[in-house]
Image: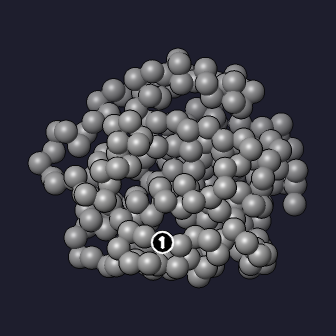
Amino acid sequence: MSDPSRLITVIGRGHSGTRAIALTLQASGVYIGDYLNASSDLLPPQKMYDACRVLARHVVHNGGVDWDFSGLHEGPIDPEFINMVEEFLVSVLNDSSPNRGWKLPETTLAYPWIVRMFPDAHYIHWYRDPRDSILGGHVTDDLADFGVPYDATDDDLERRAISWKYQYEIIKATPTPKNVIEIRFEDFVLKQEETLDRLETFLGVPLCRIAVRPDAVGRWTRTDQALDFDFLAADIQALGY
């Protein structure tokens, strides 16, 4: 495996605005893969999807929005997972650029073992108000598609909210890596200079400024959809929303 010390990856649920930071990294000379889609996701994603399903076998669902992730932090990582992740990242790991990395929202579902595989990587934890994040559908909406046990529901918004909650919880449950920073999408948009200054200090890389749209913030306030799920309330407060 290549030296991970200069790896940079973005950890954040789909529709949390991770494309903004991926575009910033790419414009700043960070190599983020040979093949990217319009959202700057590393392609093809199937090997990472499969790796997420391997990891999910070790997650215990306690009912509701409560999961036990302790089985991910002890014992060896499944070799199948390692092989799949290395295949997914082959272009990144084999590249000789001084700063390289990737963005794929589904990486969040594999986060505990990604951190164990790449303990020296730089992790950008990317957050967005969950009420905005769940307005649109995403491939991770139905956690069962990735082998994650949960109480299924026919309510699309509730399904997305549960997925957001799971991804927030799996990040919280993971021992903090030595190189990590938390960034809110809203701060990136409304306080771009201040936020990029923090990121530049963290990454040691001069970062380009990209165009941002202030109207992307607080979209949930302009919809009639019921987005205030009780099980998100404490997390919304903890994130400062």
Q: Nearer the viewer, residue 21 or 45?
A: 21
| Residue in the picture at 32% in, 54% down | 232
Farthest residue toward the top? 193
In the figure, 9 relative to 174: above or below?
above
| Residue in the picture at 40% in, 23% down | 190
Is label 1 in a helix, a strand or a loop?
Answer: strand
Does residue 238 appear in the picture of this structure? yes
Image spot of residue 36 (x, y percent)? 60, 51
Question: Which quadrant holds the N terminus?
Answer: bottom right
Question: Which quadrant holds the C terminus?
Answer: top left
Binning the other alpha carbons within 10 Å of mark 1 as few (below 14), some (14 to 19) or many (20 upward) gives: some
| Residue in the picture at 54% in, 61% down | 170
Count of numbered marks: 1
Image spot of residue 100 (x, y percent)? 75, 43
Image spot of residue 217 (x, y percent)? 32, 33
Q: Nearer the viewer, residue 18 or 171?
A: 171
Q: Amino acid at mark 1?
A: Trp
Does residue 49 appear in the picture of this structure? no
Q: Nearer the viewer, residue 95 or 142?
A: 142
Residue 47, image quadrant: bottom right
- The residue indicated by pointer 1 is 67
In the figure, 175 relative to 197: above or below?
below
Q: Nearer the viewer, residue 66 or 181?
A: 66
Image spot of residue 200 (x, y percent)? 67, 25
Is 56 positioned to the left or the right of 224 in the image? Answer: right
| Residue in the picture at 61% in, 24% down | 198
Is 38 positioned to the left or the right of 181 in the image? Answer: left
Farthest residue toward the left? 224
Q: How does the figure colour the protein chain or chains?
A: one colour
